[in-house]
Every structure is written in structure tokens, then in C-alpha cells.
Amino acid sequence: MVDTVETPIESLEYRTEVKQLLDILAHSLYTDREIFLRELISNASDALNRIQFEMLTNHDVVDPDAELAITITVDDEARVITIADTGIGMNRDELVENLGTIAHSGARTFLQNAGQSQSTLEEIIGQFGVGFYSVFMVAEEVTVVSRSYRPQDRAAQWQSTGDSRFTLADADKSTRGTEIRIRLKEDAAEFASTWRLESIIKRHSDYVSFPIYVKDKEGEPKVANRRTALWRQSPSKVEAAEYEEFYKQLTFDDAAPLLHVHMVADAPANVRSILFVPARRERSSLRLRPEYGLRLYSRKILIQEHNKELLPEYLRFVEGVVDSEDLPLNVSRETVQSNPVTRQLRKALTNRLLKELKNLAEQDAAQYATFWSEFGVFIKEGVASDFANREALQELLRFHSTHTGADGWTTLKEYIARMQPDQKAIYYILGDSLKSVMRSPHLDYFRKHNIEVLYLTDFIDGYMVSQLRQVEEKTLQNVDAADLDLPKDAEATAEDAAEAVSQDAFEKLLTHVKQVLGDRVREVREGKTLIDSPARLVSPEDEYARELQYVRRVIEEDYVAPAKTLELNRRHPIVANLARLLSEDAANPLIDPSVEQLFDNLQLLDGAYQGSVADMVERIQKLMGAALRS
Ligand code: ADP
Ligand code: MG
């Protein structure tokens, strides 16, 4: 805009979504209203970071020498507070774009949740943070006057009382930045106090890197935040409580982190970094994390807010800051990725973090168990995808097994130490839930022979074992493999031989079952490893690919897994009686439903049932009817 013609005052309507949000805020009884200040300071700090970054390469800006700072002025008689920054500023169009719609992803998620969720609005506000608009929890009227950093832009004013409209006008402001004037609601007068504002700043914005001055209308400005770049201090000088505070202010999480790692090194690359593992994957009282990534600084100047190259993707749950003087200051956000220093940093940070996790596992089993239940799946993703760090990652794995039960955990090392003398493989069973795998017929043989089996019930487990395949030269073996090389079960065959049905009747049954089930099974045969269970489904020889079936079943809606082989236990009463019934009266109406049900039961146990529930219920009722009659 280079024309000098005055643009008239415009009155514009908010987008519908903003109106909804404002309506909710106006009527909420949210008690933590003070977070409005955190939101406005965070916006001011973003704007300062952006001008600082811009000025690395562009000197043609308004007020190039202005101090990068935030100034808060209180007028308690007028019940007005003003928050001014010397940041990047906004022109008229940007004011409309940024403060007339919902740019902020947290606010959008907030609205969706406010629509559906059972939780109260107050909880949801705390959860998501609603950005700029949170000011209307305390404001009767808000006036934003802003002057963009671009010399050719003109200053503009945005004003709203938080109902359905806002106005825009030209403004007189010759200095760069944004000034937000808040006329407080009567019931929010408490915030028109320097003392109160200072204590809120301490709590929520102490580590903002620009000075935040607070002053009375006539008073002297006083810096309210400590502004330390904690990561540039020596770890021995930083208290545990300081890490915790820093984490909370960095992430807006209200729970303390599970682990912090403070890394200070000068070789092979200069790095000052603090990384955090949060306590939870989903942080209930925090805005959902809109985007993952580490804050990347070079000499305290923020280069990138969500850098994704400094750690491998599977470590995306890690929060923190990285500062390196080896990154050239004029590095663009795009070239961070291809810079060789980035690769060195990534390697160093990953190694260090994995080492600290290992230490945690060794020193604090309970804490590590918490870590594992929240973030174990990410480590498994790493085992599958990060070949270079596989050994370190493998040591972090934890499993439930037939040995530990549902409450204990084992490592792979411990499993290997417990292996039977003649045991060649590491056995595992895949399924949807612990409950179902623990009852699987595949485990009969292993229980009886005291061979441990790992329970793999995470979505990603199938993918992980298909990539891992071996540990310390021991193959990983699915217990449902058809060609398991197991020692013969001599005693069982001898002792139960008498009860078993005749060879002839059993073979008839095998043929009949194949007829009933058709293409749904590849083959029907005797299962020699079964003990307490009537039957099991085994996978054809070749496939590690079957591990991926679990993944595909979840991802692909109409995925049909390849047919398996059905093994029947001729010593089991259900099978033996079926064979007998079939020999006596092939037309007995209970035979086929029983075969169907036997098959469906196995699919249910494998977490793979895809048939119709209604059909099954009808069939079960038919069988119950017969059972109750006899
Ligand atoms: P978010 O900060 O998550 O983007 P907000 O609702 O807090 O969402 O702010 C909306 C947008 O308004 C910001 O992205 C920014 O573009 C603009 N904005 C808000 N405050 C300022 C400010 N003090 N200086 C410059 N731009 C600002
Ligand atoms: Mg914001």
C-alpha cells in the first residue's frame, strides 16, 4: 500500500467459528483467566523472534535499532492494561487475517471438542489454550494498534468488544510493533496491578528470552522475567526445579517432565541443548501439541520453532531446545536440513538421549515403566526404522510374557538368559490384546514345556518383528508358524492315545471340516502340539509378511488376510465328539454350526474376527438350545 488516501473505518463480522469461540469465552466461568497474559506475551515473543530473524538478512525495516522488548503498562484507575512489543507488527490486511479468523490450530481443536466432548468448557479451555481470543475472558474492549516492519506499510487499528464484529481503521503509530490495549471487565479489575502481572509473568513467562517490562502509568519500568537461556548455563548450576519450570513454560504442559537431558558440548559440534521427555503422551491439561519438533537457536536467536531434523522421527515425543554456534546465523529454515552440522547434532543428541533412557531404566524401574507405557511404541518404531541405533534401542524394549504375566516386564536379554538349553528361537505371539493372547491355543505346548513366549499386542509389533528378525543371533519366531522346530511331545501321545478317536473317524472329520470352511482355510490337519485347546490356526511357512497383516488390518478397511491352516487336537473332547457324531450320523444338524463356531472362536482369539456378530449370536443360540435340551 503506497497510496496516501485515508481508508475509512470498516466494520467487519468475525468468521462464524470465531463467533462461536467468543460466545463460549464470554460465558465461561474459567477460573484460570490469568493465562490470557501468557497467550499475549507468547504472541509478542513470537513477533520479536520473527523480526530478529528477518533482520539477520534484511536491514530495510522500520526502527532497526529499537530494543527487542515487551512493555506492559498498567492504569489501575482506568482499569486498562497495555501490552506493547517491538516485534514484526501487522498491517491492516494481516490484522483482519490474524485476528478475524481462527489461524490458531489449538482454537480450532478447542471448538471441535467443545462441540462434542463430555468435559466442561472450563476443562477444555485449559486443555487447548485459545490464543489471542482468550483476552476476551478479561476484556470489555480490546484495541490493537500495529505498525508492520515493512517501511511501505501503514499503521492500522483493530478494535472489538468481543461480540460478533470488529472495526478497522487507520492509526497513528510511527514505531514498529504491536500495542494491545485492554479495557478490563469490572470483575477482572484484579489484573490492573503491576504486582499481580509480575507474579503471573514469573509463573508462565519467566523464560521468555526478551525483557518484559512492567510499569504503572507514571512509574519506572521494571523487568519482570529472568530471561535466562537455561540451556546455555552449566548443568551443574541449574536446579531440578528450574528445569521443571522451564519445561512447563516451554510447552505449557502442567505436569513435570519425566526426564530432562542437558547437553553441553563443543566437539564434534558446538551444542547447548535441553531435551525433555514429557510425563504423558496425551497431556490432558495442555493444548494439544499442534506440531512436533525442537526449538532451534543459533546464538540465542530462534531459527526455527519446530525443527524436525535434529532427532529421528520416532523421537517426536521429545520436547526441548537446541542451540548451536556452528550453524551459520544466516542459515535459512530450509537449509538447516541440508547443513552437515545438523547431521552431527542429530547424531549426538540421539546417542545422548538413548543413553539417558538406558540409565533411567537401570536406575529407576518404576519411572521407566511409566516411560515405557507412554512411549514404548515410539521405541518400537525406532527398532524397526533406525538401523544405526538398533542395538541401543533394542535394550530399551520391554515385553510382557508367559513368564512375567500381565504385570511384569522382561527385556530381550533376560529372556535369552532364561531360554531352555535346547531352545533355538525367541518365541512371540501376536494379537490385539493381552487378554486374548494369554488364552491362545498356540501357547499350550510352550506352557507345558516351560518355554517362554513374548506377548506382542501393540499395533506396531508386527512391523517391528518383521524388521528386527534376530536378536543376538536368535531368530524371532511366531508361535503360530506351521513349521516350528519343536521337540516332539512324546508323553502326551502315549498317554492319551487310548482316548483318541479312531484314525478313520478323525480323517473323515478333517475332510468334512475342510468342506464346511472351504477357502477360509488353506488346509485342515492334525495339530500335534495342542494340549488344552481343541484347535489352532497356523500361518503358512514363508511369511514374515503375516506380521504385517496386523498393521494392514487396521489400516486397510477391507483387507482380507491370506487363509491359514487349521489344526485339530484329536485328544480334545470337542474334536473327539465331533468325529464320533459325524461317523454315527453325518446329517446331525449340530455338526456344521459347531465347526463354524470352532473356527470363529480361533479368529476371535487371534484378534482377527471379521465375520458378522449377528450370525454368530444366532448360531451360538442354536447350539445353546441343543445343549440345554440334552
Ligand atoms: P497463534 O499464536 O497460535 O498463531 P493466536 O491466536 O495467539 O494464535 O494469534 C493469531 C495470530 O495473530 C498470530 O499467529 C500472529 O500472526 C498474529 N499476532 C498476534 N499477536 C501478535 C503480535 N503481538 N504481533 C504480531 N502478530 C501477532
Ligand atoms: Mg499465540
Image (cartoon, rainbow, N blue to C red):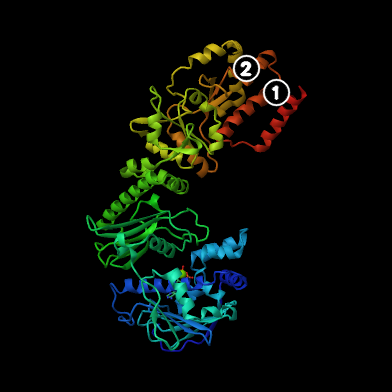
Q: Name the residue carrying label 1.
A: 590
Residue count near mark 1 (Cα–Cα under 10 Å), binned few <14, some 14–19, many ≥20: some
Name the quarter where the N terminus is drawn. bottom left
Front of the two marks 2 and 1: 2
Residue 356, image x, y percentages = 35, 49
Q: CA distance from mark 2 to mark 1?
A: 14 Å
Q: How many neighbours does mark 2 have within 10 angstroms: few (below 14), some (14-19), or many (20 or more)?
A: many
Question: Residue 477, relative to residue 145: is it above or below?
Answer: above
Q: Which residue is mark 2?
A: 576
Task: Locate residue 115 relative to residue 204 in the image: left or right.
Answer: right
Query: Residue sitting at 48 percent across and 28 percent down?
Result: 480
Where residue 412 is drawn, which disc sits there? none
Residue 180 seen: no
Q: Give the left or right position of residue 574, taking residue 316 as reference.
A: right
Q: Is residue 434 above or below residue 446?
A: below
Q: Nearer the viewer, residue 377 or 604?
A: 377
Which residue sits at x=56%, y=31%? 439
Q: In the rendered view, would you say 74 is above or below 369?
A: below
Q: Residue at x 52, y 75 (%)?
A: 135
Kindly state the secondary structure of the residue where label 2 is placed: helix
Q: Which image quadrant is residue 319 in?
A: bottom left
In x, y percent, where is residue 243? 38, 61
In screen coordinates, is 62 left or right of 255?
Answer: left
Report which quarter residue 573 is drawn in.
Answer: top right
Q: Is the C-beta of the residue carrying label 2 under 8 Å from the nearest atom of ligand 1? A: no
At label 1, the amino acid type is: Leu
Ligand 1 - quadrant of the structure image: bottom left
Quarter the C terminus occupies: top right
